[in-house]
Amino acid sequence: MSCMHKYRLGLEELDAAIDGVSGGIGILVEGPSISGKEAIVYSLIRQGLDDGEGVVLIPTMETGENVLASYGNTKNLRVVDCMSRPLGLDRLDSANVKYVNGPGDVTGMGVWTGRLLAEFSGRPVRLCIDSLSTLLMYSSLQLIFRFLHMLNGKVFAAGGLSVGVVDEGMHDQKTMASLRQLYRAALELKEGEDACYVRAVRLTPLPTPWFRFGEVIE
């Protein structure tokens, strides 16, 4: 069952260092707006699909069709699309993609995400919101906090993994502190001269070493 399942992050050295992530936990992917953040999110989603988990993704800067095209096996991938309608694209809900009115439609996102999570009842499931920073451009911190608290409650009760992505430099300390209340652990990102690095915090007794995971793109 999902409560015994160990979640992998799709980053070989980091996965070896933390020996899998137990269900019922939230991870905040935080760092500056660097090119490597997309690679981290891709690895997290790809690993869940490869491991046969249910994956629910809320991308705030990509259409559902583009997301599906990024992954080969989409049988267990569900997407809440926030972008197609604001772009004027006429799309109908499908098994894989559900449409809401935009990044500010928190109610619609909550309804569809809850239904999609329920599709994977009794199975390992991971939820990823990419990104929280975009949601906070359209709604108040208080509203987003309640929204995330509700969704994380559903994920944690199911023994799942919840991932939120945030551009750290866009927010003040109060906002970051509030988000960290909702996600017990973190993947911290930084950029070196020629590479991007990641480490896990609060998934092990001490932070892991920094691991290289991608090249810097100028």
Image (cartoon, helix red, strand yellow):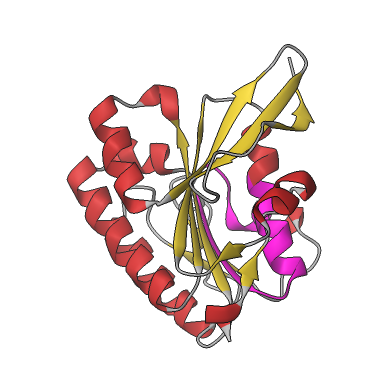
Indicate whether 122 appears above or below 127: below
Please check the rendered image and state whether residue 64 is part of the magenta-colored stretch, yes or no.
Answer: yes
- Between residues 34 and 91, which one lies in front from this camera angle? 34
- Between residues 19 and 69, which one lies in front from this camera angle? 19
| Quadrant in the rendering for residue 199 | top right
Residue 163 position in % (x across, y down): 50, 54
Residue 51 position in % (x across, y down): 74, 71
Residue at image point 48% right, 75% down: 159
> Looking at the image, can residue 111 be seen?
yes
Indicate whether 196 appears above or below 119: above
Is residue 163 shown left or right of residue 18? Answer: left
Q: Quadrant of the C terminus?
A: top right
Residue, far front: 205
Residue 64 position in % (x across, y down): 59, 57
- Read off the magenta span: 41-67
Q: Quadrant of the N terminus?
A: bottom right
- Between residues 105 and 75, which one lies in front from this camera angle? 75
Is residue 122 shown left or right of residue 45? Answer: left
> Looking at the image, can residue 60 be seen?
no
Residue at image point 69% right, 16% down: 192
Residue, far left: 142
Residue at image point 52% right, 72% down: 93
